[in-house]
């Protein structure tokens, strides 16, 4: 069958025009398994052709990341069932932070409970956090608060009995995210503990989470969050992915490991769903990997290893790195006393 035809049949059921169908979708041949070194991984159970969509995952939480929120046209609607870029700006009546926008009164109303959870925290902590700790940590903590907000809404919603899912969803999936707790440098953990105590253990946040549980959320977020970029990540054509406009946590997409020769590209659609597309033919049993960074900017093996160590705290064990890294004999042979 032609690639185009397969793609047409297997593309996500939910289209960007149909908000009521804003559901995650995973290709029937995509499964998860366990690797002794890398932990959980995605693989395919039958061949997949280049161009086929493998997954369109809905985020558990998203935050906008823009330089100038007042004039930006890149801010996503705060309503978690919409997440389209906002053109008609409906603002927060409490003026919490300028990035909180909805595309209509209907979206604001639909998002009332979720935003109600974060609004007081944003109003009391947002500006001071930004000026004391900078934009990066404002974003890290806001994403945690949005995760807690989504959890709070989920815990109050009525559960409809479902068949056993192939992939966990909601808070169950969030608890399964790896946190790499033993790998983060102590200095980083000290800094994150300070941030938790100063900004998250606060009365403006109605949560029963302990400081230790919040720290685990930061570790999970640092290991699993995605930047949202206008163009695909993982293409081999050297075109960079453009400017980041949001950051998000995706429960199912987070199972994908990194490879410096990925067989999947990832790109958000117009509703903030993370879409995985096969960039090569993938054989049955093969692992499906994305690239965690822009490979067009990071070519050399030592640079790639350094990048992953600094950003994610792990040493890359992908096929390309294993082939390009010097063997133990080569390292010993290069030492002056040998
Ligand atoms: C987003 S998670 C991917 C899913 C993860 N394997 C799990 O068990 O949940 C990222 C973590 O997976 C592991 N990982 C991903 N790609 C890897 C690679 N190329 N080499 C070694 N470890 C990798 C690292 O521990 C990394 O921090």
Image: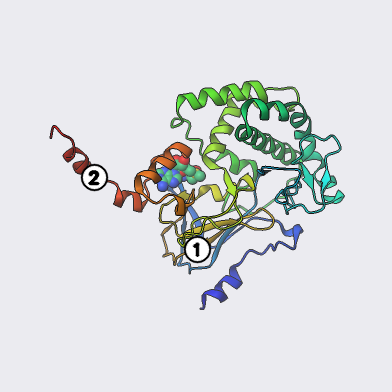
- Residue 92: image x %, image y %? 83, 39
| Residue holding disc 2 | 327
The residue lying at 65 percent from left, 38 percent from top is: 143
User: Is residue 327 toward the left or the right of residue 184 in the image?
Assistant: left
Whether 77 is drawn above or below 18: the answer is above
Q: Residue at x 68, y 58 (%)?
A: 270
- Give 129 or 163, whichever is nearer the viewer: 129
Kindly identify the residue that appears in the image at 48 percent across and 39 percent down: 311
Residue 8 in picture, x, y percent from top left: 60, 72
- Residue 27 has which mark? none
Image height of 261 relative to 137, above or below:
below
Q: Is residue 196 left or right of residue 85?
A: left
Query: Which quarter holds ligand 1?
Result: top left
The reply to whether the C-beta atoms of the residues labelled 1 and 2 are less than 8 Å apart is: no
Q: Nearer the viewer, mark 1 or mark 2?
A: 2
Query: Looking at the figure, which quarter contains the C terminus?
Result: top left
| Residue 23 in view in this figure | yes
Which residue occupies the foreground of this view, 96 or 226? Answer: 96
Q: Which label is found at residue 278? A: 1
Q: Earlier in the sequence, mark 1 or mark 2?
A: 1
Image coordinates of residue 114 in percent, x first then y, are 77, 40
Residue 139 picture quarter: top right
Give SS at disc 2.
loop
Q: Secondary structure at mark 1?
A: strand
Q: Is residue 56 depicted above or below 191 in this figure?
A: below
Front residue of 31/98: it is 98
Quarter of the figure with residue 144: top right
Q: CA distance from mark 1 to mark 2?
A: 31 Å
Residue 52, image x and y in percent?
53, 67
The residue depicted at 64 percent of the width and 46 percent of the height is: 246
């Amino acid at each position: 069958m032609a690639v185009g035809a397969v793609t047409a049949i297997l593309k996500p059921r939910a289209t960007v025009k149909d908000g009521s169908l804003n559901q995650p979708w995973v290709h029937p041949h995509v499964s998860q398994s366990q690797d002794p070194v890398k932990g959980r991984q995605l693989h395919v159970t039958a061949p997949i052709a280049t161009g086929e969509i493998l997954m369109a995952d809905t985020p558990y939480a998203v935050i906008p990341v823009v330089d100038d929120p007042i004039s930006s046209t890149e801010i996503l609607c705060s309503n978690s069932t919409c997440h389209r870029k906002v053109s008609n700006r409906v603002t927060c009546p409490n003026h919490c932070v300028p990035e909180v926008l909805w595309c209509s009164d209907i979206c604001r109303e639909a998002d009332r409970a979720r935003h109600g959870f974060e609004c007081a925290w944003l109003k009391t902590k947002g500006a001071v956090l930004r000026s004391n700790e900078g934009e990066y940590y404002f974003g890290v903590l806001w994403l945690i608060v949005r995760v807690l907000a989504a959890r709070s809404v989920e815990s109050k919603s009525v559960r409809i009995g479902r068949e056993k899912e192939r992939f966990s969803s909601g808070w169950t999936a969030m608890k399964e995210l790896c946190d790499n707790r033993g790998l983060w440098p102590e200095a980083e953990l000290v800094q994150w503990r300070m941030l938790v105590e100063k900004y998250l253990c606060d009365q403006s946040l109605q949560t029963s989470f302990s400081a230790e549980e919040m720290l685990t959320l930061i570790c999970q977020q640092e290991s699993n969050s995605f930047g949202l970029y206008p163009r695909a990540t993982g293409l081999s054509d050297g075109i960079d992915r453009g400017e980041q406009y949001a950051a998000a946590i995706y429960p199912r997409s987070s199972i994908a490991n990194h490879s410096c020769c990925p067989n999947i590209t990832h790109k958000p659609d117009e509703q903030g769903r993370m879409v995985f597309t096969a960039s090569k033919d993938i054989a049955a049993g093969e692992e499906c990997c994305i690239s965690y960074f822009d490979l067009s900017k990071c070519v050399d093996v030592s640079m790639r290893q350094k990048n992953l160590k600094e950003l994610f705290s792990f040493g890359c064990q992908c096929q390309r790195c294993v082939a390009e890294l010097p063997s133990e004999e080569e390292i010993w042979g290069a030492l002056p006393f040998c």
